[in-house]
Image: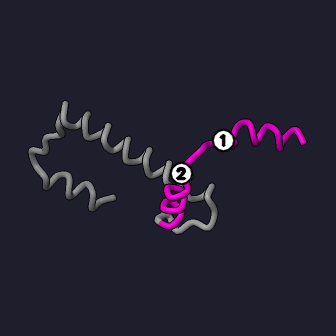
Amino acid sequence: MTYTIVYRIIYRMKVTAILADDLVKSVKALTRSSTITEAITIALKDWVDIYNIKELNKQIKKTPVIIDNGQKIREKNRSL
């Protein structure tokens, strides 16, 4: 019993949200999920990934990566 309570507190969060039916249906269809929970989880993970990519792009814009010699990088990648 205690393990179940700890698991629910640490690893999961139960949320009540009011969402438009059309939006939920669209997300469920686009993610090809069988449940609403799975569809929303996929959509939120994708949103977080996109957000992180945008933040990385901002950082790269401030301090761009300059590659003087692409051959060294290609050789390093091929050796891995």
Horizontal and vertical percent position of residue 68:
9, 44
Horizontal and vertical percent position of residue 24:
54, 57
Residue drawn 29% across and 59% down? 79
Residue 16 figure quarter? top right
Residue furthest to the right in view is 1
Q: Quadrant of the N terminus?
A: top right
Return the residue at label 2: 20
Residue drawn 49% across and 49% down? 45
Magenta region includes residue 23:
yes
Left or right: 15, with 80 as reference point:
right
Q: Quadrant of the C terminus?
A: bottom left
Q: Specify start and end residues of the magenta stretch as a single range.
A: 1-29
* Label 2 or label 1, whichever comes before in sequence order: 1
Residue furthest to the top in view is 62
- Label 1 SS: loop
Return the residue at label 1: 15
Residue drawn 44% across and 44% down? 48
- Label 2 SS: loop
Q: Nearer the viewer, mark 2 or mark 1?
A: 2
Magenta region includes residue 26:
yes
> Is 27 situated above or below 47?
below
- 42 or 29: which is nearer to us? 29
